[in-house]
Image (cartoon, rainbow, N blue to C red):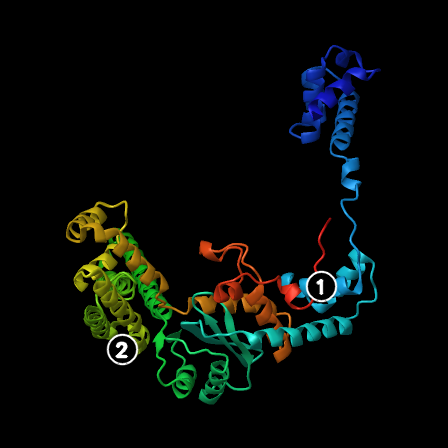
Amino acid sequence: MVTQIIGTAAVAGSGFPRGGARLGPAERRGLSVQVLAGTDTVTGLAARHGVSRKFLYQQAYKASAALEDAFAPTQEDQAVLFHLPVTKHWIRQFVLGLALEGHSSFRGIRQLALDLLDYPDLSVGTIHNILQTAAGQARAVNQAQDLAGIRVGAHDEIYQAGRPVLVGADAKSTYCYLLSEEDHCDETTWGVRLLDLERQGLRPDYTVADGGLALRAGQAAAWQDVPCHGDVFHAERELGNLAFYLEHRASGCTSARQKLEHQMERRKRQGRGNQLSKRLAVARQAELQAVVLAGDVRILADWMRKDILSLSGPSLATRRELFDFVVQELSQRERFCPHRIGPLWRGLEGQRADLLAFAGVLDEEFADLAGQFDVPAVLVGQLCQLEALDINAPAYWQSRGPLLAKLGTKFLPLQQAVRAVMAETTRASSLVENLNSRLRNYFFLRRDLGSGYLDLLRFFLNHRRFPRSRCPQRVGHSPAELLNGRSLPHWLELLGFQRFHRN
């Protein structure tokens, strides 16, 4: 459309130099585009096409005017789409939406109200009062929530301005049931908070957490019969970091050896090659040792991640034997890198029971499935290991065939049951780690959090619907709706507001 406008405008013009009069609309349009694009100088274009520089500037001006006209705002852009009644009731929703949905600071909210609404009466103190009033309503909703449906909890603590914030969330629905700023992070604090939550019905089958001693001691004191499983993510990460460190060190040894070899070649040509022979022998020995160590540790790390700590794996007894083997192999290599390998294998040895606790849950669930379907428990375990294989690889179908022959019509329903059990078994506290990363986006705006702000924030995160998720069943639902199994009003409506709807 723009090129047509340019060509038409060029035809309608008059007073061109004689060289330009012989050019058609398409040629003039092309010249104007070249002038605007700056691909060549105006002098060069004028000489090449036999026209004057004045003529080219005229065409460029017409092209520029045509472009401005083509992209000028239309009357539709200025049309009123709808009218919004701005009341004090709406202003309060505006403040809450910017603070919680928009992650805006108090002064940012005030400035937006002034810039977009021409509303100078919204002070920082008024914004604070609006949030505090909503926090009181949010606290009442939080305390009224029944937590008896939570079966697996994920616990952690983060720090804001040197003060600990205790965090707890449901591993299935992602409902945050604990968000409390404390003076200390110790056994008593954790125990008291967990006992408070027990009054709301919280008594999970087990929890998942990292190796924090205060967290585990507090849970043991409050819930003596609720186990706290280990978080496999941290163990896998530490092993992966060790393997990467050793691989990087081996690469450095290889570079050092190659550098010495180049120096050796130069000195040989000068007749002084014997000066580096001992250093080169030592470098080659160090490289061989570093490469072998890095390869061994990488194999052990992959074995731990893909077989021992994975959902699809052998029974608990077999995992324990494999776990002990990996720890023993690491301990035998401690002398090659004592400052990194030593603390790691000792930490793994002390956490074996916690890290493998999920495998015991799987064994119990698989034993129940074996009884329900009247099949040997070993076949259920083999179905679990089948899930670790790539469905597009020959190994999957080679393993699937014998199982299908043995189970017959029970194969598909049993496979679905095994998958459901694996999906509901929690191995890591990654969900609460994800929650912590979302909390950071709010914490950085404030140095002092306060219990009221945390109550409001917890309410918002629990009642805001997920716009997207890796789990399809969560999309379009809030954590509170997933926990309760029913639809709930919008979070603004739960706070007593009437939302604006266009007619």
Q: Nearer the viewer, mark 2 or mark 1?
A: 1
Q: Secondary structure at mark 1?
A: helix
Image quarter of residue 136: bottom right
Image quarter of residue 281: bottom left
Residue type pointed to by label 2: Glu
**Percent of width and height locating residue 351:** 30, 77
Q: Nearer the viewer, residue 34 or 199?
A: 199
Disc marking residue 93 = 1
Q: Nearer the viewer, residue 214 or 403?
A: 403
Residue type pointed to by label 1: Gln
**Percent of width and height locating residue 194:** 47, 82
| Label 2 – label 1 distance at C-alpha | 53 Å
Q: Would you say residue 84 is visible in this rendering? A: yes
Q: Mark 2 touching mark 1, by CB under 8 A?
A: no
Q: Nearer the viewer, residue 397 or 32?
A: 397
**Percent of width and height locating residue 183:** 55, 86
- First in sequence: mark 2 vs mark 1: 1
Residue located beneath label 2 in the image: 349
Image side of residue 253 versus residue 278, left or right: right
Give the residue at x 71% y 63%.
93
Assess disc 1: are there few (<14), some (14-19) or many (≥20) residues with their C-alpha within 10 Å of its C-alpha.
many
Give the residue at x 44% y 72%.
150
